[in-house]
Every structure is written in C-alpha cells, then in structure tokens.
Image (cartoon, coloured by chain):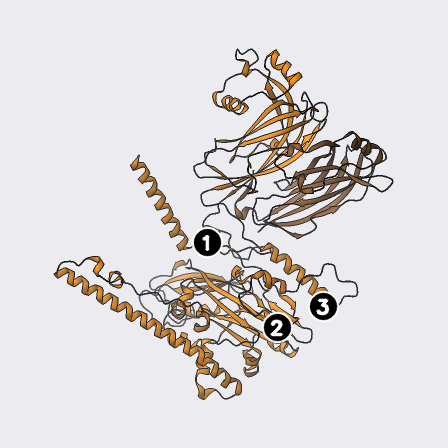
Chain colours: A brown, B orange
Amino acid sequence: MAEVHIIGQILKAVDFDEPHLYCKWSLQSGNAWRLVQGELQGQTHVSSHRLQNSSDFAQPLDIHLCTAAIQGWPRLLVEVYAVNVLQQCWPVGYGFAHMPSTPGAHRLEINTWKIAPNSWWQSIKERFGGGGTALHKTDLLYSGVERYKLLTRSSGKIIVELSLIFRKFEEYGVEFK
Amino acid sequence: MYKSSAPKRTGIYRIKGNIADLRLELKLRHVSEWLPVPKFEYTGAKLNYGDHYPESPRNGGWSDCFIYVPYEDQYGNNYYTYYNYYNPGSDYPGSSRTSRTSRSSSSGIVAAASRTYPSSSHSQLGEQPVDAAFSALNPELSNGSTASLYIGWQQKHFSRRELERYGDASQCKTTLQRRYHRWTRHIVELQRRHRLRVQREQAEQQIRVRRRRKSKRKSAHSKTPPLSSLAISECSVETQPLPPPDDPNFAARTCLVHTLIDADLRELPQADWPPEAQQLHDQGYQLMFVYAQLQQDTLLLSLRYQPAEGLLYVYPDFSTTADDMDYVLQIDNDCRQLYAYGFHLAAIDAGAANAAQPADQLLEQLPTPADSLPGSEASAEQLVSYYQAKRSGASALRRLLQFQLPPKRMRRVTLLLQLHEAQHFEYPNIHVRYYVNPPSHTLLEPANPNDPFPLRGATATSVAGGAARLAHFSHCWQLTLLCEESHEPHQLLHIYFEVISVDGWQRERCEGYAHFACSLLSPLPAAASAGLRLQCIRPMGSWLDALNRYFIGGRSLFDFVGYFKSRSRDNLIHNRLEAGSRHIMRSTGTLLFSLQKLQQRHQPLGHLLAPEDSDDDDSPAPGHSDKPAVSATLQEVLVAYVEARERIEALLGQSALV
C-alpha cells in the first residue's frame, strides 16, 4: 500500500469577527485509506490576539496514512468556534480543503463559512446573546444534492502549513501532474 | 518479480490459553525459475589446468570451456567459480554440484538457513540434477500449486529422510521412534493411494488412446461412423500424458514441509541441533522449527515458547494472512529458484480451532494494544507486549489491501476540484452550479454510487456574499475517470460554471457563466493547483432584458454550454459590435477555482505478482536489482503475446469488414 505522511500545523485563524476562537479539525478520506499512526481529528486551544484580528493556534499535525487507492483523497475539515465570557461557544466557520496532491511544503488558506441566520430574531440573538446556528448533522457539510438551499455567510480563513511525504505511489503507477 | 521479501522480525506474543492449541497455517509456492546468466571464459584448447585443479574424471575434448560465475561469500569476499559448460556433472571443485552447497545467497533476499543432511530420495534419483529430482518428487509444487499445511504446536511432520528411517520398524528402538513409526504409516498409505490413483488414470488414458487408434483404423477401412455414435471418451484426443491428479493436500503426502520439535532434539546429537538451539533449550524454551524440503532443506520459521512468562517468539513474524506470502526464499542451484511463503496464526483458542475462520476474527485473537500507554509502574514485559502489539497492528493495516490498479490499457485520472470564492457580481446571495462534461472514450467511476448526478452539483448559497463582499464557498469535490486506450489527449474535459443569485423574494438571476477546460493526460498549468481566477460573463441582452432582470428576475434560457463549445470549436470572435444580440456578452464577477490531478496507469507486466513491500525497511536488499522488466516470467510474456495477437486479429477482422 502507498503511504502519505502529513506533517505540519494549523497556523492561525484570520479575519473572523469574534475574538476568542478555537478550531476543531478532522481529516476525511475514502474507504481505501487507513490511519497508520497519528490522530485523524483534534482541537486547538482557545486563542485571541490583542492587536490583530487573528488567533494563533500552531496546532501540530502529524498523520501517517496508507492507502490502497487514489480515490477518496484526504481532505481537511476545519470547524472554528467562538467562545464568550460566559464560556458559551458556537460555530463561526466551517471549511474544507483537499490535501495537496504533490509532495513538499504547502500553505493552505481555507475559506470558511457559517450558517446564516434565517430570521431576524436569530440574527439579534447571534449578535448580542452569543451563539449562532449550528448544523444538527455534520454530514450536511459535505453532502446534499440541492446544496444551494443551505444558506451560509462568509467567515474568516484558516491558515495551514503542511509538508507532505508520499511513499510507494510510483510503484503503483501514480503520477502527480 | 518479487522485488524483496518482507522484513523478517521476531514477533513476541503473549499466549493466554493453552499453547498446545496454537495452530498456524503455512502456505508455500514456487514463484519462478531463473536461468543463471553465465560469463564465458575461453581458457585455451590445450590448457593444462592440472596444476590448479584436481583431475576431472571425465576430461573430454570440450572440457576447456568454462562458465565463469562470480559470487560473494557471507563475509563479503568476492570469489568466482568455474562451471564446466559441457560437463556440469563433473566432480572437480569447480563443478556445479560441489559449488552448489558452498554458495550462499548473495542477494540477501533471505537468510535461508539450511540443514545439510542428505535426502534419501535425492540419492535414489542418482545422477539427475537437483532441480529435476525435486520436480519429480514435487510435481504439484513445480506446476504452480500452492502447498498449504496446518501445523500445530509441537506437531511432528516428517521429512522424506525421516519417513524412510521411521518406516523401518526394526530401526525404531525408543518409545518416540516407535510412535513415529506408527505415524509414518499414515503417510505411506497416502502415498500408496496416490500412486494407485496415478496408475489407474494412466491406464485409463492408455485405453482411450488405444480406442482412438482403433477407431482411426476402422475409419480408414470403412465408412466413417457418425460422430454421435462415438462415446465421448472416444472422441477425445489424448496424446500427451495426463497431469497428476489434483491433490490439495500434497504437502503432507510429499513431505514437503517438516518440523523439528523438542522431542526430536532430545534424541538428536547436539552437533545436529540448529544454531542457538542448545542455548535456548538450556534457558527453558520450548523450541520448534519448520523446514521446507526444497532443493535444499530450508528453515522457514522458528518458534520458541517460554512457559514461565507465557511468551511466544516467532521468527519471522506472523503475516496478516498466509495468502499474502510475504516472505521470499531464493535458492541457487542449476537455476535460481524463488519461493514465496507466508503463515498466519490460525487459532490460539481451543474452541476456535476451526481452520475456516475469517482472517478478521483471527486477527482479533492476536494480542491487541491497550488504548493508552502502560503506566510508569509497567514491567518490561508489558512495555514489550504493548509496543509489539502496536507495531503488528500498524503493519497489519499497511498490508490490508492490494492497491487498486486501473484496468488493463486504461488510465485512471482523479481530479480534485475546489471552488474557493467568488466576488464582484451584480447581486449578492450567490451560489454556483457546475456541470462537468468529460471527453469521449472515458468512463466515470462514481465516488458515491447513490449520487444520481455525479457530473453536476451546486455550492451552498452565500448570503450577502458575491457582490461587494467575498463569497466563501470552500466547496470540494472529486471526480475519477477511466481513460480508455482510444482516448486522445487533445480531447478536453470541460467544466461549466453558472453563478446564480437569489434575492429575498426568491427571484433567481443569472450572474455569469465561466468555463474551464483541461486535458486529462497532459500536465496541468502550475497555477491550476494554486487557484485560477475565472472571469465570468453573461449575455448583455437588450434594454428589455435589463428591465426584466431588475424588476422580475428569472433566468433567461441561454445555452452557455453551446456557446462555449462553439467558441472553442469555431474560433469565432464575439464582440459587442456583433450583429447577433445573443453573442454580446459582458463581464461580471470572478470565481477562484483550483484543480489538482492524479493519474494512475496500469503497471507493466509482472508487477501484480510483486508482494507488498517491506514495511519499514527502505533499503533494498543488497545485490538485488529493481528491474520490473527482468521480473516478467515466461508465462506472463506468453499471456501478453496471446492477448496482443487476439487484439491484432480483432483489428484486422474489423478492417476487413469495413
């Protein structure tokens, strides 16, 4: 089986409206992929920056995957949550990105979005009371035939730095073009 | 073919039940036979080599031609051996027969420990070469069958020499020998039945041939009888000897695999013990060695069990399944023989001794790693078992599946597509719909079989985004296509984007169209993976269309696919001064779109037989070359030749029809 090493870090979150943020991340892949070592999901600490509109995470990633097919190439799902002084937290950004398909160093900027409030009362509640709308089922994030019915609002970005090592792909005739 | 054997490591397992219930399944098969590539050295017609070599008993006129074969001994010294090309059976030190036993495997594929006691069957076959004698004794293995055998803990399997020795009751003096004598009767009976079966089938074959000849003679003298009047057996043309009857359990009958157990060691003189067996036996280990009686006796695996600690040491380690045949043996004789073998733990539980258990259930019986690290008070044994279990679990995962290759003469192309963002459109609340148009001679491999429309989709709607504010989509999807052989690289994959805004009154408006095309087989531009900014356009329309768009909304029927197709096909120049209003376009916003591509071609011949590579050992075996072209067997070449001939015949037939 071919192998992929994903080494890097979730560097920071930028351009979010909320100051105190943390990020849940998970790596999703097809059925032919297996985790050899490392963690497929995790969560950063809560971070905020006093001067800039960014939250530094520096969450390390070290994942070793093996695969029996090139279908189901892994993708990184990030979920950014905001925390207020009452220790309430709510999602403020969902984002996806494919893992780069070439080995080496990469910098990913994952644009995120959040669920748009669908009523006036919800938007007031989000602005003052804390807490936005969350998805009841997370599979709605990446599935759905009529996806345009999902109303979202643009949010900030997550910066991820990755170094990828591929192994044994050439033995199975895989080319990265 | 077999690029390397799996790394050989000692597996350590904690036995929870009774060790006597341990049972492993062993599989062994012959992989290939390579002829040596000799280097000829002409030493002169009248050279007297008596000063250097002892006199050969058969010095003929052709004995001056030698095959020069370099080799390397176990200490890394380079030596060479002269083989008499015309008289390979001669007995002087340079001949193949004597050097065969002294040579060691130089490739390092496997450290084949060999036992040097001679085989009685080999002595019976006298002057035959070793490979021929082995083939005569093991026709099934030589014909490509896989030997499969279940071996229990301290279960005795006899070699041919032991079979002969214990078959004679007069030589059995001790209790163990008399017990072995009883057990050998079963194998002798098996061999007798097999001989009878072969003889019966040969007799039937001769009868069929005789009937065939008789019927030919009759037909020559009289009128040919109708075909239906002949029996089926008479119609068959059998001119060649039948292959031996199928016997799936031939390994037990031919004594191909035999064991050396603790009880044997007690009766053997210590000089004949395997290396380190004495020391381990003194330390209280129970030992068991499994050999294969190939061209030379070869150690396949060794097991030792420490009853005090309940630990079982296996070298090499168990495979996930015996079918993987992870380990490779290389035996150099007149020809270089490659064998592959594998073994796995079939049962450790007395209640689970059924050999037909699926591998998953058996794997669960292996010691599993604890969820967390052992604490600081953990003993060394606990740490060893923890890391051992963790490592075996990881290696099992890595060898879980065979890599999926595309069908022959096809290429698999996986596209990773992503829509990042959009901006500068007239109205906000946009979403993007996309349509993929793959080129001809490609097949779609849907990632989700339940998806009714795998070639089209839509992003989520970005509320208040797309106009002045950036609309983040971060929408990913994958597409896998199989390119047939007749696919031409200039045929492009087309992706069409349609940007639609929906206002508060649910009025849809078309905000723009974009198009992207790429070749499936050519490399993508470097910017494609970083992100391409696609300029969107939409029909300008007349002033009435503008009023309709502002007040009523709605999407006008515009064949944007046809528009982009005609543009790419006819190279027509469309501009705002063109008379046809349907071709007057205006620029709207932009889309940020990225694309990554992976291609997979079918591997050349012989690669499919290559096993999963070593898990941790990156360094290739010394002296072992990585040349897939060399690894193709004759059979594979013949198969490829037959396939190519059929294809050419099919093509010629089609052209003749046309």
Q: Position of residue A38 (x, y in %)?
A: 69, 51
- Tags 3 and 1 both on a single chain: yes
Q: Which amino acid, mark 2?
A: Arg
Chain letter belonging to callout 1 = B
Q: CA distance from mark 1 to mark 2?
A: 36 Å
B162 relative position to B16: left or right: left
Q: Residues within 10 Å of mark 3 (few under 14, many from 20)?
A: few
* Dot label at residue B631: 1
- Tags 3 and 2 both on a single chain: yes
Q: CA distance from mark 3 to mark 2?
A: 16 Å
Q: Which residue is mark 3?
A: B381
Tally the marks. 3
Chain letter belonging to callout 3 = B
Q: CA distance from mark 3 to mark 1?
A: 43 Å
Q: Residue furthest left?
A: B221
Does dot 3 land on a helix, a strand or a loop?
A: helix
Q: Position of residue B440 (x, y in %)?
A: 46, 33
Q: Which residue is mark 2?
A: B304
B154 vs B332: above or below: below
B633 vs A139: above or below: below
Please tell me in which quadrant of the rendered image residue A44 appears.
top right
Whichever of callouts 3 and 2 sits on the residue coming sooner in the sequence is 2
Is B627 in front, or is B482? Answer: B482
**Quadrant that contains the C terminus of chain B:** top left
Does dot 1 land on a helix, a strand or a loop?
A: loop
